[in-house]
């Protein structure tokens, strides 16, 4: 689906569609939201509080909190959320 | 006693630091001892609320003047403690709370706090973040909060500028009376001073015992929690009638949730442990008051120690029978009122009549006899039934 | 207040990587009732992370880690261990109560013994641009490659130190991705010196040499004794700049090398995630070889708090296999301490595990030296570099706070908000403490963040559950 998903060695799940700030993004069942966003080229997930600088997922293992987005209204670490059809994701500005 | 200081202060919280500051500015050669760093116990880890609606009635006149001091900290302290002055609301969600609120707001009003009882609609205008279910609210224009964790940094700079000899990370193991004053015992040897102020918060009991005074001090272990930065969800200080909630959002977006729910700890270990039920109860109360908080994440919870005397009124004044020795602390809502009470003590030590009466500890030293009634004791007795059973 | 029914056990294990899983299995085999909790949906930890439901690794592409992970999961499934996945542990209190947000709400678990097996997180010494999107950890790259079937970017730079460099770069190449360069703080001499130790694990050495060969075949430039000094780009990583460094990782002048890249995977070693032992106020000591502050333990993982055991990389960084053995020892010790294994049998079983662990030490030591903390790198950070990502606190602000009297790490937090954000100081703690140590003399003087709940940020909505106002147990009002 994009250049970052590699072909060899992986059998992917069904295609799912979710929305990021209203725009449809396609991914595969089994992917984490953080990985699906990366694959879709959505790398800037928030703005830092004082400098307003862009920030993106860093650790992908639940530590850094840089990948936190609103998922169906609630703040979630996107690296800990599995994508499912119909997810509504809002990126955060500077908070 | 050549080389002796004019004043030794033991304890570097808001009380000790304020006494040291005003005495040093008035020309006293002052040394301040703190076993850790300045304002890192109750003075640095409290919720920073500067409210009248959780202040004891007997302290309202003091708290009003202290509020004005905090609001003008840049002028007299010279450094910023992040003070925001805003409206405050105390909410009643049940008939019982409405009764309690009416009674308590009335008493505080008599004592000078400008609290009005307002309708739910008016409360909603004051605080658009309020949830449904409010029956009645106390509204006070004199409210606000400081950023408690900045207290030490601000006082530290002010004390150094005032010429106080600052001894952080210097535990004091005892004080001995000498012919012309006191010898403060430290690991590096005794330090002598003509006057002494004990300002050790919950550790005042041990400190008073150094001089043979038996002053029981109760230790409260107050839990606090803070969210990560979130979009604005509120703009006032919000509490409830029972006083067991304090809630406000700082300009940088974090929301501090307190109200005196008890954790575990003691003088030796500090605020050692958070009790999950207490934390969850406190969070439920907070989210009931401000529903948008539910969408925030809890970033950190901690517990700090608060000192309470037998009658829950301050211990501020001379130590009986020991010339030139004083005590300063144990103030309910001590962060709010601390600077003013400590300044009163400094006035007294500098030979001027304090603008308001001190709280001498003689009343607390009577042996087993029942405590002498204090002005607010009647109100307290009538008011002390458990809120929810 | 109606909290869910408590779960009682002889032992609660937090963390289901190789260490925690081994502890749970050893204790369970000895007859203890064990609850095993982890944030992930399946056991395995980071190293043996299970492919998520829906994704699967093709049979021909499976590596030794896939097999080890499957074996671990099969072991837990076949045991009497009570497995609770997707559990976000937020509070550990008393002796012992563990509160976790699970898919069914907040649940409390009680046991007289507790094993903390929470793993490590990555160290990264900041440089200008390290906060830009596209810059990720080496371990993060591994997760993307192994469990998501993704490469970090269209063109990646892989940088830092230790064996993960070659592993990540080679896996990107094998997946068909482009690696612009590998930037290694170590020099060929460092690797030669590590060789005897690495050779004690022939399987892993062979694996590493295989990766190196793949990089050579793909003609990936490898810059030894180099470090990343900047990441440039408007909204995300576009260019990575590397420069020669000395043995301690400090830029030593010399020509800069720039690489166009939209991803940088970088790591400077691992830090034990010892938050639970800190929360429970166990004694800790600073041990650079173990990655930093680590709980004081006996040979079986027993901490200074009775009934508390700490194992794996979350206690002292040593790698997956030593972690497994340390977990096994703690599981045996917990069973012995509970009176379920007689002394003789305990000593016999433990002796063979300890012998295995001793054989690992040369390898772990060699890797540890390659990935050691390098205080000189911290010293070389430029003043305007962001140290605390959550709160945008720069080095110069930290230096100002130090000049204003901050002497320990918690005081520095008060003065600057460094470490007050949602990562709870995990990303900035090592750097901030390193900067403070330069002024006050030692990491011991600086101390560590006081342990505070929640162990990870928790949505308030998850904690609240359903409640009626009247059910909130409001305590007696304060005196009027």
Image: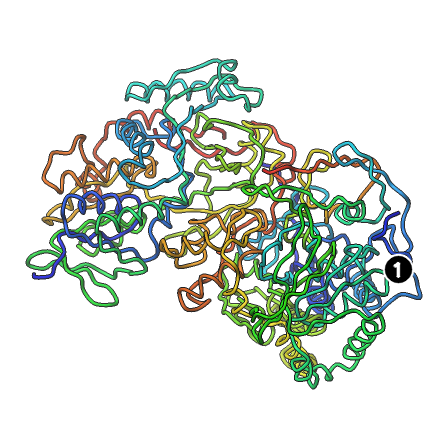
Which residue sits at x=79%, y=35%? A19
Above or below, comparing residue B68 to residue C67 in the picture: above
User: Farthest residue in the front direction?
Assistant: C255
Which residue sits at x=59%, y=28%? B291
- Locate residue B199, reporting x and y percent: 25, 48
Q: Is residue C71 left or right of residue A64?
A: right
Above or below, comparing residue C474 to residue B330 in the picture: above
Depth check, front residue: A52 or B31: A52
- Locate residue A6, reporting x and y percent: 87, 56
- Locate residue C314, reporting x and y percent: 62, 64
Image mark 1: chain: C
- Locate residue B239, reporting x and y percent: 46, 28
The residue wearing badge 1 is: C57
Whether residue C269 can be seen here: no
Q: Is residue B222 left or right of residue A56?
A: left
Depth check, front residue: C143 or C374: C374
């Amino acid at each position: 689906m994009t250049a970052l998903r590699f072909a060899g060695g992986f059998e992917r799940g069904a295609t799912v569609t979710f929305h990021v700030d209203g725009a449809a993004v396609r991914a595969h069942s089994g992917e984490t939201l953080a990985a699906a966003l990366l694959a879709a080229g959505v790398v800037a997930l928030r703005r830092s509080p004082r400098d307003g600088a862009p920030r993106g997922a860093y650790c992908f293992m639940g530590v850094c909190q840089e990948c936190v987005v609103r998922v169906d209204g609630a703040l979630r670490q996107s690296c800990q959320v599995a994508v499912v059809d119909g997810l509504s994701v809002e990126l955060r500005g500077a908070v | 006693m050549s080389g002796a200081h004019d004043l030794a202060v033991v304890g570097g919280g808001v009380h000790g630091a304020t006494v040291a500051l005003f005495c040093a500015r008035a020309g006293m050669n002052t040394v301040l001892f703190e076993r850790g760093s300045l304002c890192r116990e109750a003075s640095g880890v409290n919720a920073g609320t500067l409210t009248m609606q959780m202040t004891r009635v007997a302290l309202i006149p003091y708290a009003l003047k202290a509020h004005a001091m905090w609001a003008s900290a840049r002028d007299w302290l010279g450094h910023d403690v992040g003070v925001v002055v805003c409206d405050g609301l105390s909410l009643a969600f049940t008939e019982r709370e409405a009764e309690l609120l009416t009674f308590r707001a009335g008493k505080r009003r008599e004592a000078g706090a400008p609290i009005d009882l307002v309708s739910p609609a008016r409360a909603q205008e004051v605080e658009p973040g309020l949830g449904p279910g409010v029956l009645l609210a106390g509204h006070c224009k004199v409210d606000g909060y400081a950023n408690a964790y900045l207290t030490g940094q601000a006082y530290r700079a002010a004390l150094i500028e005032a010429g106080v000899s600052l001894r952080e990370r210097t535990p004091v193991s005892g004080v001995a009376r000498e012919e012309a004053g006191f010898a403060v015992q430290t690991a590096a040897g005794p330090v002598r001073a003509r006057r002494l102020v004990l300002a050790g918060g919950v550790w005042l009991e041990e400190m008073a015992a150094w001089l043979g005074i038996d002053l029981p001090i109760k230790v409260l272990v107050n839990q606090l929690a803070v969210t990560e930065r979130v979009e604005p969800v509120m703009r006032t200080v919000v509490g409830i009638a029972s006083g067991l909630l304090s809630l406000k959002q700082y300009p940088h977006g974090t929301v501090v949730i307190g109200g005196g729910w008890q954790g575990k700890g003691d003088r030796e270990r500090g605020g050692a442990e958070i009790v999950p039920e207490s934390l969850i109860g406190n969070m439920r109360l907070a989210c009931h008051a401000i529903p948008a908080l539910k969408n925030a994440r809890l970033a950190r919870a901690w517990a700090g120690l608060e000192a309470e005397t037998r009658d829950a009124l301050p211990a501020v004044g001379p130590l009986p029978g020991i010339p030139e020795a004083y005590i300063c602390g144990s103030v309910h809502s001590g962060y709010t009122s601390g600077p003013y009470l400590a300044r009163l003590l400094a006035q007294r030590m500098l030979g001027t009549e304090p603008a308001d009466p001190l709280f001498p500890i003689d009343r607390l030293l009577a042996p087993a006899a029942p405590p002498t009634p204090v002005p607010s004791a009647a109100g307290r007795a009538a008011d002390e039934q458990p809120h929810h059973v | 207040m109606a909290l869910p029914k408590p779960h009682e056990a002889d032992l609660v294990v937090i963390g289901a990587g190789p260490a925690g899983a081994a502890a749970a299995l050893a204790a369970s085999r000895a007859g203890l009732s064990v609850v095993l909790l982890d944030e992930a949906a399946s056991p395995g930890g980071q190293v043996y992370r299970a492919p998520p439901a829906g994704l699967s690794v093709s049979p021909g592409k499976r590596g030794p880690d896939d097999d080890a992970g499957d074996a671990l999961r099969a072991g837990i499934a076949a045991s009497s261990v009570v497995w609770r996945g997707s559990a976000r542990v937020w509070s550990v209190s008393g002796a012992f109560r563990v509160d976790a947000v699970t898919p069914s709400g907040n649940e409390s678990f009680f046991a007289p013994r507790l094993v903390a097996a929470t793993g490590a997180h990555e160290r990264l010494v900041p440089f200008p641009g390290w906060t830009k999107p596209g810059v990720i950890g080496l371990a993060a790259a591994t997760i993307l490659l192994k469990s998501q079937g993704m490469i970090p970017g269209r063109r990646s730079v892989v940088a830092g130190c230790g064996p993960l460099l070659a592993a990540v770069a080679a896996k990107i190449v094998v997946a068909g991705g482009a690696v612009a360069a590998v930037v290694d703080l170590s020099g060929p001499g460092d690797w030669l010196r590590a060789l005897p130790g690495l050779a004690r694990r022939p399987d892993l050495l062979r694996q590493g040499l295989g990766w190196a060969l793949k990089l050579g075949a793909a003609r990936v430039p490898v810059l030894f004794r180099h470090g990343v000094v900047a990441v440039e780009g408007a909204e995300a990583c576009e260019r990575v700049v590397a420069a020669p460094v000395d043995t301690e990782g400090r830029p030593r002048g010399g020509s800069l090398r720039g690489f166009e890249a939209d991803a940088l995977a970088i790591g400077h070693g691992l830090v034990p995630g010892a938050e639970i032992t800190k929360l429970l106020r166990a004694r800790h000591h600073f041990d650079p070889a173990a990655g930093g502050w680590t709980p004081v333990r006996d040979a079986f993982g027993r901490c200074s708090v009775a009934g508390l055991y700490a194992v794996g990389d979350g206690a002292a960084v040593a790698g997956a296999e030593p972690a497994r053995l340390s977990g096994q020892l703690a599981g045996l010790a917990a069973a012995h301490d509970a009176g379920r294994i007689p002394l003789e049998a305990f000593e016999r079983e433990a002796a063979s595990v300890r012998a295995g662990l001793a054989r690992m030490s040369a390898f772990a030591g060699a890797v540890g030296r390659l990935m050691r903390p390098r205080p000189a790198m911290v010293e070389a950070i430029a003043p305007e570099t962001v140290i605390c990502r959550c709160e945008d606190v720069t080095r110069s602000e930290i230096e100002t706070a130090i000049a204003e009297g901050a002497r320990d790490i918690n005081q520095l937090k008060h003065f600057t908000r460094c470490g007050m954000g949602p990562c709870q100081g995990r990303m900035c703690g090592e750097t901030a403490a390193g900067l403070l140590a330069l002024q006050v003399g030692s990491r011991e003087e600086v101390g560590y963040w006081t342990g505070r709940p929640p162990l990870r940020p928790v949505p308030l909505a998850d904690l609240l559950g359903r409640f009626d106002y009247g059910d909130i147990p409001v305590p007696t009002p304060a005196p009027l």
